[in-house]
Structure formats: C-alpha cells, structure tokens
Amino acid sequence: MYKPFAAILALLSTAFTITGCTNPYSQYYTDLTGGQNVFESPKVILPTEKPKLIYGTNREIDEKKMLEDGYLPLGFSSFNAGEINQKEALKHAKKIHASTVIVYYNYTGTVSGVMPINMPNTQTSYHSGSIYGAGGYANYSGTSTTYGTTTTYMPYNINRYDFYASFWIKATPMKLGIIWQDLSEELRQKLGSNKGVYVWIVVKDSPAFNSDILSGDVLRRVNEQEIIDSNHFQKLLDNASDPAAEFEIFRNGETIIKRVQLRN
C-alpha cells in the first residue's frame, strides 16, 4: 500500500472512534459509590494484583454471580464507538482500584461514505537547447518544478458498537452475607402482610450461605423482633450483639426457624 494512504487509513480509523487521547471508559464512566474514596471504605478489599478483564454474555446473570461471589459494583461505562482497544478498560479499572472489569459489546451498524484526500502533485520538467547570437552560439539545459495538489476521494466503512463495562471490587466478609429488598406487592399479598424483607442474593461461604438461607426466602423476624422493611432490618442487623441470631423465614408457603452464627 502506498505509504500516504496507509497513514490516512490510520487517521480515518481514529477519526471514527472515540479513543485517541481520551479513554472512553473514563469519559463515559458513572460512579456508583457516591464519590466515596475506596481507600477509606471498610466495606472493600483493595486489590493487590492487576485488574482482570472478563468478556460478559448476559449482564443480569453476570452481575448476580459477581454479587454471589462477594464483589461490589464501583460503577459502569456505556458508549457507542468504533473499534476499541480493551486495554483502555483495564487502564480505567486500575485507576479506580477495581479488581475486575466485565466488558460487553454489540454491533450496531456500519458508517460508510467517502472522504476527500488532498495528495501532493509535483511535476518536474527538463529543458535543453541552443542559443545563437552575434558572438556565436551556446548550449543550455535545466529543470523546472511545479508544485500542486490532486484531490482523491477514498471510500470508508467503519463498524460501530455499543460498549458497556461494569467495574467490581471485592467486599470485606459480611456479617450475615445476604443482599435483601423490600417486599413486592405480589409477596405482600401472598404473605398477607406488609412486613419483612426478600432475600435476593446469598453470598457464597457467608454465615447465611452456610446456614442454608436461600435466595427467594422472606425474613420475617430476627430474635423475636418483627422486621418492618429494609431499613429496619439493617438497623436490627447492625445492633445484633450476640454472636448468633435466630431468623424466622417464610419459604414455599411454610415458616421455618434458622439459627445463624454471625460474623464479627
């Protein structure tokens, strides 16, 4: 390939992506920590190794698995662009102290067109001849150069993608090891009550996991204290001073009792 055209193609590729000097994973990043400094958070473990890159397939499944494995989301990036070097995702992960980044991309179409390119057009002419005069004659020779440009129209095709990346950090071991939600309207009708919390995630190797509390359980009471909602349950859990706690659980239409050894 003619070298000027190779350079033009490289520039063209850059022109239709948003890499360049700006990292799109940083430029289009949404922080989920509320601006909290991870160095000051007792809830996370700062990574000691380089961040790991994972290519995701299903966001809902992948995110649930990360939560079950004891990770917390730091934030996410979302943008549309041409080809992106995924080292940029790792650079941003390192910048925000994430231990893992999961990247997703989906082809959205091809941008096509033509671009006018001005190329140098230099012409050199050679001249020679003889001159006659009263004193005789003489031969001469020389060159002349004319400088100009020629416009060439070059077609291009740039593939575009939707990119999404989530950034994760390992959480410190949890006291109980679940992520819970307020009851849905359907569960309220099923229980005949507005009170309790729904177990969404059970973290592996946590007290809840080892005591066989399951995703989908409804927690009704802690140590004979009725659970009102999510905020109330958090307060009950924070104020639990005994190393073990008794939970009343609604599961598959039945009420069961489990005694769980809480983590300090």
Image (spheres, rainbow, N blue to C red):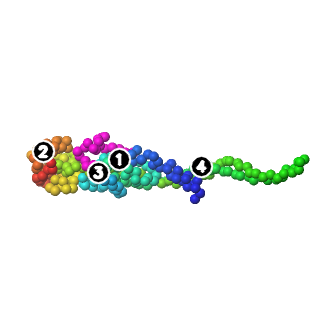
Label 3, label 2: how far apart the Cα atoms are:
30 Å
Residue 164 shown in magenta = no
Label 2, label 4: how far apart the Cα atoms are:
72 Å
Name the quadrant of the N terminus.
bottom right
73 on left or right of 175: right
**Disc 4 packing (10 Å; few <14; some 14–19; many ≥20):** few
Magenta-drawn segment? 28-48
Residue 238 is situated, as x and y percent measured from the top left of the image, at 16, 43
4 vs 3, front mark? 3
Q: Identify the mark nearer the N-term, 1 or 3.
A: 3
Q: Which mark is residue 47?
A: 3
Foreground residue among 73 and 250 = 73
Q: Which mark is residue 240?
A: 2
Q: Which mark is residue 116?
A: 4
- Describe the element under mark 1 as helix, strand or loop: helix
Q: Residue at x 11, y 49 (%)?
A: 243
- Describe the element under mark 4 as helix, strand or loop: strand
**Disc 3 packing (10 Å; few <14; some 14–19; many ≥20):** some
Residue 42 shown in magenta = yes
Q: Residue at x 18, y 55 (%)?
A: 209
Residue 248 is situated, as x and y percent measured from the top left of the image, at 12, 50
Foreground residue among 92 and 24 = 92
Label 1, label 4: how far apart the Cα atoms are:
39 Å
User: In the picture, residue 194 is in which quadrant?
Assistant: top left
Q: Which residue is mark 1?
A: 95
Label 1, label 3: how far apart the Cα atoms are:
12 Å
Callout 4, which amino acid? Pro
Callout 3, which amino acid? Pro
The answer to whether marks 4 and 3 mark residues whose Cβ atoms lie closer than 8 Å is: no
Callout 2, which amino acid? Ala
1 vs 4, front mark? 1
